[in-house]
Amino acid sequence: MVLLVGIVLASLNMRAALASVSPLVSDISQSFGLSSTASSLVTSVPVLFLGLGALVAPWLARRFGSEPVLLFALLLLAVGILVRVAPSPVALYGGGVLVGTAIALLNVLMPGLIKRDFPDRAASMTSVYTGAMIAGATLVAASSVPLEKAFGGSWEASLAVWSLLAVLAAVTWLPQVLIARGRTGHEVRMASARPGSGTGTAGKSVWRSALAWQVTLFMGLQSLWSYVLIAWMPTIFTDHGMSRSTAGVIFAFNNLIQVAGAFAVPLLAGRMRSQRPLIVLVTSLVAAGYAGLMIAPVSGAWLWAGILGIGQGGAVGLALTMIVLRSGDAQTAARLSGMAQTVGYLLAAVGPLAAGAVHQATGGWTIPIALVLGVCAAALAVGLFAARDRTV
């Protein structure tokens, strides 16, 4: 029970620090005089380090154990959130580096930990932690602007308050660290493995596996379309005349609806030998929602936010579930998780930056959204291969 609470609280933090920025990005940009491209770096830098941090996560877990590394990640996240609000653009981006690295550790280690401790309930536990992850993003997205107003117009205070959530989660992991110390060194080593390495040919087989690359690319492409929305959805609305408060509420609604997809799709995936119908469903929903943002961004805002939310939540839940389902054991799950999230988030980091740059160059959102529709098509193609009933 204590482990379950720890997983839920840690999961609440896995998007919160990212979602808190999006409704406030215009104020942050004005404070530092940032261009659209420079503003996109506020969200792209953490996503980039979601990928880079994933490179070291399995090694750290193998060296120190999953539980101590998770505790460290939560404390690092709290520090990164506070650094990010210091009165300097360097601190803004530097804090983003710490935030991204901390979340990367959480992202990579959670699937392996679930495969290890809940081997018979892996799909249902994945739905629990992905649902909690998106619920945390929803809470933060809905609260960012009201908190800014409550703190007298201080976006810095609005962002900083979420460090308390990370500290609370860290406290719940202290008992797990003590329990982990009672395990033998062999058990800790078997709980975590370095992506692409490990012993003998086992590590090499992950990085040389076509199926592993298909899972990885689906993870990256669905992350790309999600982080474009995390970075720019409120701005797309306000650029078309919507008030900032309304845009923030619709963005929060988008995150709230994601909980349904993130909870339901992994449960359905666990009951299927092949998840291809779910791949078609989630990619079609996301493509339809993006097309709506292109055609009628304000008049249909609530509808598009809802359609996108179900598709986004379902896609991330499906991507994380496939990491578990395509793995034969906890060690392979840790390796595949590290590979998928290293390459996947490095790919995803391109999304917000490219969307901001194309928007700045064209003066509108039509071309950036059209490019994301191409990403949806690519995700559908690779996802159909990743969803086959095979294991790495």
Image: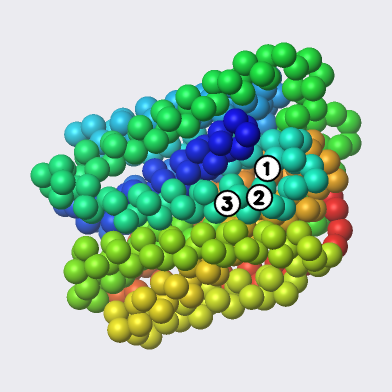
- Residue 140 seen in this snapshot: yes
Cα distance in 3D space between marks 3 and 1: 11 Å
Report which quarter residue 266 is drawn in.
bottom right
Dot 2: within a 10 Å radius of its alpha carbon, few (fewer than 14), some, or many (20 or more) residues? Answer: many
Q: Which mark is residue 130?
A: 3
Type of amino acid under label 3: Thr
**Disc 2 marks which residue?**
126
Q: Earlier in the sequence, mark 1 or mark 2?
A: 1
Q: Which mark is residue 8?
A: none
| In the image: residue 222, left or right of residue 336 | left
- Residue 5, position in %: x, y? 56, 36
Residue at the spot 29% in from the left edge and 79% down from the top edge: 298
Type of amino acid under label 2: Thr
Instruction: Indicate the secondary structure of the residue bearing disc 3.
Output: helix
| In the image: residue 103, left or right of residue 82 | right
Dot 3: within a 10 Å radius of its alpha carbon, few (fewer than 14), some, or many (20 or more) residues? Answer: many
| In the image: residue 365, left or right of residue 50 | left
Tell me, yes or no, whether the two marked residues, 2 and 3, touch with CB atoms within 8 Å: yes
Dot 1: within a 10 Å radius of its alpha carbon, few (fewer than 14), some, or many (20 or more) residues? Answer: many
Query: From what the image shows, is residue 212 above or below residue 354?
Result: above
Cα distance in 3D space between marks 1 and 2: 8 Å
Q: Which mark is residue 111?
A: 1
Query: From what the image shows, is residue 75 above or below residue 297?
Result: above
Tell me, yes or no, whether the two marked residues, 1 and 2, touch with CB atoms within 8 Å: yes
Cα distance in 3D space between marks 2 and 3: 6 Å
Residue at the spot 45% in from the left edge and 81% down from the top edge: 291
